[in-house]
Image (cartoon, grey):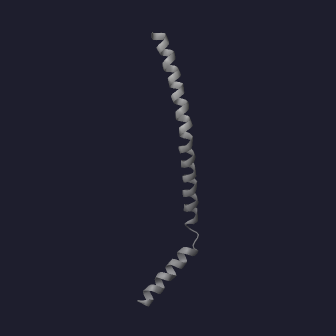
């Protein structure tokens, strides 16, 4: 039992000291930052598109009436 715990402890220590997963974490943070920026920018884009289509609709409505 102690041998198994020692092997498990050594495995966790080697994983903790390893820097192989560091790039993956950095890429995940970058993707999260880009997703947050895109999500926050969508509100202003949607508002602008909505006002543009309202203007087009009112202009076309005045020509039809």
Q: In the rendered picture of this protein, how many numbered marks are placed on residues? A: 0
Q: Position of residue 39 (x, y in %)?
A: 53, 44
Against 29, residue 7 (above or below) is below
> Which quarter of the image is occupied by the N terminus?
bottom left
**Residue 30 x %, y %:** 58, 54
Q: Quadrant of residue 28?
A: bottom right
User: In front: 57, or 28?
Assistant: 57
- Left or right of 1? Residue 50 is right
Task: Determine which quarter of the picture holds residue 65.
Answer: top left
Q: Residue furthest left?
A: 1
Residue at screen point 56% across, 36% down: 44
Residue 42 location (% of width, % of height) = 53, 39
Q: Percent position (x, y) of residue 56?
A: 51, 20
Say if 61 sits above or below 43 in the image: above
3 on left or right of 32? left
Residue at the spot x=54%, y=77% of the render? Answer: 14
Comparing 62 with 34, the one in front is: 62
């Amino acid at each position: 039992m102690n041998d198994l715990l020692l092997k498990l402890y050594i495995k966790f220590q080697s994983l903790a000291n390893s820097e192989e997963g560091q790039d993956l974490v950095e890429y995940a943070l970058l993707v999260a930052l880009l997703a947050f920026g895109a999500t926050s920018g969508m509100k202003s884009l949607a508002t602008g598109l909505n006002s543009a289509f309202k203007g087009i609709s009112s202009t076309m409505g005045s020509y039809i009436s």
